[in-house]
Image (cartoon, rainbow, N blue to C red):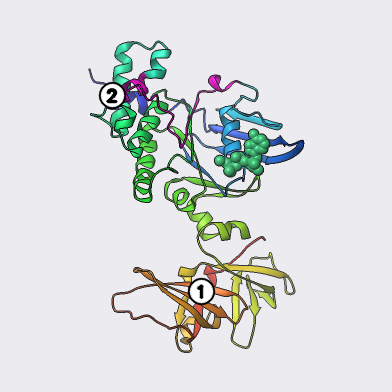
Amino acid sequence: MTTPQHSAVTQPPPVVDGTPAIRFAGVHKNYLAHGESVAAVKRTDLAIAQGEFFSLLGPSGCGKTTTMRMIAGFEEPTAGKVYLDGKDVTGVAPNKRDINMVFQSYALFPHLNTYQNVAFGLERKKVAKDEIKRRVGEILEIVSLTGMEKRAPREMSGGQQQRVALARALVNRPRALLLDEPLGALDLKLRQQMQVELKRIQREVGITFVYVTHDQGEALTMSDRIAVMNAGVIEQLGTPREIYERPATRFVAGFIGTSNIVEGRCQRAENGLALLSYTQQDRVVVPCGSAVRAGDKIEVSVRPEKIDLHRGVPPVSATGGSVLSGIVNEVVYHGTSTNYTVATAAGADFTVFDQNASNADDLADRGDRVYLTWAPQHSYLIGV
Ligand SMILES: Nc1ncnc2c1ncn2[C@@H]1O[C@H](COP(=O)(O)OP(=O)(O)O)[C@@H](O)[C@H]1O
Ligand SMILES: [Mg+2]
């Protein structure tokens, strides 16, 4: 036979000419809790593409699980519609949606071995024995469990059990796989390995993954796109790079990585740059398009690794953008970088990550007077 390797599983679900795999139109969800109505997800529009690795990222209680449960059909929206491959499935039962879910608790059958756990769903569907054997073998290879067919769950590590759960879900070739904080129970090292593995597996099977996490590093590592949720609302949706480099709101700026934020009234806005000025020399410059006028109150953010720290007065070449003087409050050595906390003339404490080059002594000590500089394009407005 000339069947290509992994053929059965790598065939993605039929793509309906760019139709999103999953779409929310005005989806709203209220729960009744102790007689009070709680809005868990607020009027959300969302489109997840076929074959995308899509993450829902946000703090506990922001509505991630509720969103997943509405995709799977375990919850119905209070208002709005859910579409799968362009078809309205609002009100359709979970087992008619062709969606599978993987949880943090693997929920494997303890008395069944790996093969039996993975084959279970296909056997119930009365798939032919030969085909079951082929598909289970194929998917076990993809999740790197070949040779573990006879093991019971209790004879395997947490990471291996998670792979069995994943294989069991994928072997059904669902339209989409929903993963709700699946790595939460694993220790850091194993979690990081599984992040890379999950991404590889998703690429190989070509199935749409919707991944829920409260861990920003995890979302940045694995996702094609991320929706950052806060209190039932998607505050920003974009690629990991867009979300990290250009957080759209104060919440996103604070939740993803470390951000320095200053606020003030714009003194001047010209040539697409807005100026916040604190003293003769201390100033922050930010690209603003036509969004800002003199007198407007603005918030400006800059990432810690974009800032240069100078012990003396900075060279003229470094002063075309933002310049803030300050006093070093804290120096923390992190191996690959040194992190400084600096009380600045803008009134805000700044964090600066200075990459440790081979010959570098620490640039500054506690109590030192320093100057922070960064180029105009590294500043961005938030909440505009
Ligand atoms: N079955 C429920 N009944 C009442 N309130 C709920 C129920 N499930 C979730 N909630 C509330 O809805 C909000 C969102 O919850 P959830 O979707 O579980 O958030 P996340 O998964 O992001 O932690 C929270 O305020 C939570 O308390
Ligand atoms: Mg949850």
x and y percentages locating residue 120 in the rendered image: 39, 18
Residue at figure coordinates x 64%, y 76% from the top left: 275
The quadrant holding residue 333 is: bottom left
Relative to 179, is 92 on the left or the right? right
Q: Is residue 138 left or right of residue 298?
A: left
Count of marks placed on residues: 2
Mark 1–mark 2 distance (CA, rounded to whole Å): 54 Å
- The three-letter amino acid code for the residue at tag 2 is Gly
Which mark is first along the chain, 2 or 1?
A: 2
Residue 25 appears in view: no
Q: Residue at x 31, y 22 (%)?
A: 115
Residue 72, image x, y percentages: 56, 28
Residue drawn at the location 64% of the way across and 82% of the way down:
278
For the question of whether residue 139 can be seen, the reply is yes
Identify the element where label 1 is drawn.
loop
* Residue 139: image location, x then y, percent: 33, 27
Magenta-tinted stretch: 93-119
Amino acid type at mark 1: Ala
Q: Which mark is residue 137?
A: 2
Look at the picture and state if 299 lies above or below 213.
Answer: below
Using a 10 Å C-alpha cutoff, classify the residue at mark 2 as few (fewer than 14 neighbours), some (14 to 19) or many (20 or more).
Answer: many
Marking on residue 375: 1
